[in-house]
Image (cartoon, coloured by chain):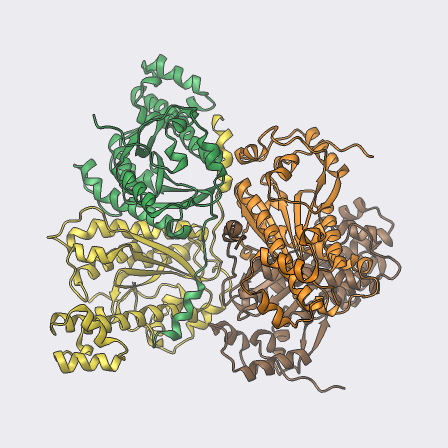
Chain colours: A orange, B brown, C green, D yellow
Amino acid sequence: MANSRFEYVKHFEQVDNLLPNTWVVVRIDGRGFTKLCSKYDFEKPNDRRALDLMNAAAKAVMTDLPDITIAYGVSDEYSFVFHKTCNLFERRASKIVSTIVSTFTAYYVYLWPTYFQDQPLSLPLPSFDGRAVCYPSVQNLRDYMSWRQVDCHINNLYNTTFWSLVQLGGMDAKEAENLLKGTLAADKNEILFSKFSINYNNEPEIFKKGSVVYRDYELVEPGSHDVAKEADELAEPVQQSKTQSENDKKRRAKARVLVDHVDIIKDDFWERRPWLLSNKPGKIPKQT
Amino acid sequence: MANSRFEYVKHFEQVDNLLPNTWVVVRIDGRGFTKLCSKYDFEKPNDRRALDLMNAAAKAVMTDLPDITIAYGVSDEYSFVFHKTCNLFERRASKIVSTIVSTFTAYYVYLWPTYFQDQPLSLPLPSFDGRAVCYPSVQNLRDYMSWRQVDCHINNLYNTTFWSLVQLGGMDAKEAENLLKGTLAADKNEILFSKFSINYNNEPEIFKKGSVVYRDYELVEPGSHDVAKEADELAEPVQQSKTQSENDKKRRAKARVLVDHVDIIKDDFWERRPWLLSNKPGKIPKQT
Amino acid sequence: MANSRFEYVKHFEQVDNLLPNTWVVVRIDGRGFTKLCSKYDFEKPNDRRALDLMNAAAKAVMTDLPDITIAYGVSDEYSFVFHKTCNLFERRASKIVSTIVSTFTAYYVYLWPTYFQDQPLSLPLPSFDGRAVCYPSVQNLRDYMSWRQVDCHINNLYNTTFWSLVQLGGMDAKEAENLLKGTLAADKNEILFSKFSINYNNEPEIFKKGSVVYRDYELVEPGSHDVAKEADELAEPVQQSKTQSENDKKRRAKARVLVDHVDIIKDDFWERRPWLLSNKPGKIPKQT
Amino acid sequence: MANSRFEYVKHFEQVDNLLPNTWVVVRIDGRGFTKLCSKYDFEKPNDRRALDLMNAAAKAVMTDLPDITIAYGVSDEYSFVFHKTCNLFERRASKIVSTIVSTFTAYYVYLWPTYFQDQPLSLPLPSFDGRAVCYPSVQNLRDYMSWRQVDCHINNLYNTTFWSLVQLGGMDAKEAENLLKGTLAADKNEILFSKFSINYNNEPEIFKKGSVVYRDYELVEPGSHDVAKEADELAEPVQQSKTQSENDKKRRAKARVLVDHVDIIKDDFWERRPWLLSNKPGKIPKQT
């Protein structure tokens, strides 16, 4: 075949398979979103339309890629989690990351007009970058998720206070920054309450907690069995019969993909939703 | 800081910097485009609108990311080349790949209505995956580019003949496939000519050669100096003065990004466009 | 400094840190040991001197590198295990592998005359290669160890039967090979017993089980607590006080490094020796 | 087969092939050689026996592994270079590094008594670690080699002056260190000459230049052809006939492995020895 003289170049591609039996987290981040925020006049400290668009795109990614078990988003970033037994694309890092980033971007651009009716996109377009990280144990995975949610909390409390000082208190950015330097959470709560009568606890959950996306099955009584231990003990992908595997697929397809704004740091969230760690679809809740 | 207990999870991210002083090629491929083709009734063997959309997206990527020196596209794939001295994102593979894939996807979805006015996108949306490969020498890089263009030629000749047999010759797919089994290029040319009076040489260049995208400067007399040798001898990024670097940037921004359909296998293409291998912007051609 | 012009070459070294919180197994293999066996007239199917030399070298490696928690050897291979929390050399793969291979080789060559008094080494010298593999869970690690021990058993039963047929039964290699083709373990046991009155169960444990090397502390009643679970739940290196860390170090230094020939597939071995999975040194047994 | 239940653990081994068509440098370093120096009373600033032992081990490594084209050693480190077309062990990094480290260590320990007759080795034994680095162009490779030789020069000039001040000038280490702080090469030369009548230029070449190891063929007139360019232009391993390949092998085996102490920074060294960059064995010099 005429092509063969050049085909040797294929051998320069290097293998980048992710370690088996580890949780894979793909985190994507908006590129240059500070500029984007000001270009499209995003509200400060949080723009509800922008967050809803991020969540809609994440939901679509989870629907297109049923291998994702849970996702967590805050601001212009989103983390997608694959179960440790997942073998999508033979776990090739670049294929997994690029697919998620591309799918997310496609929906973000496509759905933009739904959320920003009066502000059509113009060049240059928004885009995202991404990376994959492996976590060996359930605790590592949960600590990763907790890290992002704590980050959400810290940033949101800071931003809420900062922008109150600027928007309601008439300070300029420099003054607000200086005032907040070295303050603790309690101090910021106090500033919000005493100066602006804002009770931070009453702020919308989506701002305080970020957004968790997952398939919705019937909740389970916590403490009934130790899913984390079972997940950690898993050594290799479960061998399923074809029927079983088809059943799982169907149940996943039937399940509603839910966007939630709840605490994912405490055990309760995970114990009530054992399917997140076990990768076994739960019961579809009766429709009400 | 409250966050610190979880921050250790950052250390699980593994470094993926690409080897310095090598040409970086990022190739992206449409995911499941066979389905897409039939969903939107792409013309066979080539859909001009689809190719124009690919090229428009590639052009936009090159404009947004001036570090790309040349790109080559065929069918639903595109290869983007970074000069060996490029240090974009400290050469982190996942960051480079995800940025290109995301930017390309954003433009593909955004520009879709321009090229498919009567066929609005519907779910699931088109997406792309990508990977980065390093090529140490100019010859390796050129062989990669040649490999893709030879592939374009082989596939296009086959597809043109196959679809002529089906569309004009009334065969079904199986019959056409059987007829073509084991045929050489000359045989296919002969079939096209004798059965359908099609001279393959007169087919549109965009179908036969694919699409090359690059910044357009004044062409140079071939043979004047050995750019390939100079490029191979380069050992580390050239140290430029800030003024020089700013000048280069301006010239790149001024240059027109061109979509061309020409032979990139022979030396001539590369010798007339020394900036592709040297990374030094050429002269902006006088406007005519 | 005059050196700086060339120092850029340092940046070509690529990072190869192993994923944190995973068990690291470094396996080394003799290079070209088939030739070596015949050059020094190793006894077939097992040469006790050669195995003792391997074990002595492995023991020395574990003494020089106290971070190793357990090692397992069979034939001309040895696997060294680092606890998942180990941070030796910042977990750089090439540094860990090369250090173990080098230390093992040094002792192998140095101790050779002790075990082969009448056969001095001559050129070319014996050497080993090595590689590091990460295992995320206790079960993965134990399955790796079991894999090697099952391999030892299968090979040894085969070799014992094969060499009995040749050495005692007067067959040539081809005949013995043909006879054994397709036989099961029971068949080989039967051949050994009926033809040569050899009860395989009475063969030396070192041949049947291979060699396990570890620090010897007081055994613990199995079932008292779930070390595997605790190990799996560990998320990051335990923060120890300096005193605690010094104590551990001293206890490790005091502990006898033991070479054992026992079953490491069943739970019992691991439950009685919790320090292997917990990385906490046990009690030094009273001397008798 | 009984073994199969555990065999899945093999899939955890990750691929680590080095990029094709790049020069591979494996550098090994003595581990804890400061201690070793004082344990065996190495002479300061240079111990001729220790250097001769390093060189003898390096020579043996090159003889055992004919794929190595050149090696350079200084102090307790040695760099081994594989030609860019070399495909040894399919270029698996851990296999290449561990093999070199192991072979080097074996000879170092084995040959120790030849060079240190009165000081038998005792525990703990000397060992080495290693790493592989890829260099895409001839210039990168030569800059790496130059970097090591400049390092040799800088360190040796410093050490020679430092130890003269201590051994001949009666200073203690602190005083000598302070005196040398901030001095340039010229200053050190001056100190050596004015205080101790030592002309640094007359110091032994092995101390000033380090040691280069390579196969010795007939030297070639420099400038006759551009080997560096040819090497850079090479895109893939040369396809040789079996006869040609056997011939090369024989010539390599016949060639004397030479330990030299010469300048490898200037072009002259490389131009006179084109086989180092071309990988084509030269003419065996007539014996004299």
Residue displayed at 65% across by 61% down: A161
Q: Is residue C45 visible?
A: no
Q: Quick one: which residue is furthest to the right in this view?
A: B118
B180 shown above or below D49 = above
C199 sits to left or right of B126: left
A104 sits to left or right of C233: right
The answer to which of D43 and D241 lies nearer the viewer is D43
Image coords of residue B171 (percent x, y): 85, 48
Q: Quadrant of residue C204?
A: top left
The answer to which of A103 and B279 lies nearer the viewer is A103
Residue displayed at 22% across by 47% down: D124
Image coords of residue C189 (percent x, y): 39, 17
Q: Quadrant of residue C176?
A: top left
Q: Is residue B244 visible?
A: yes
C226 shown above or below B194 = above
D266 shown above or below D259 = below
Quadrant where the N terminus of chain C sits is bottom left
Quadrant where the C terminus of chain C sits is top left
Residue displayed at 22% across by 40% down: C112
Residue displayed at 52% across by 55% down: B1
Q: How many marks?
A: 0
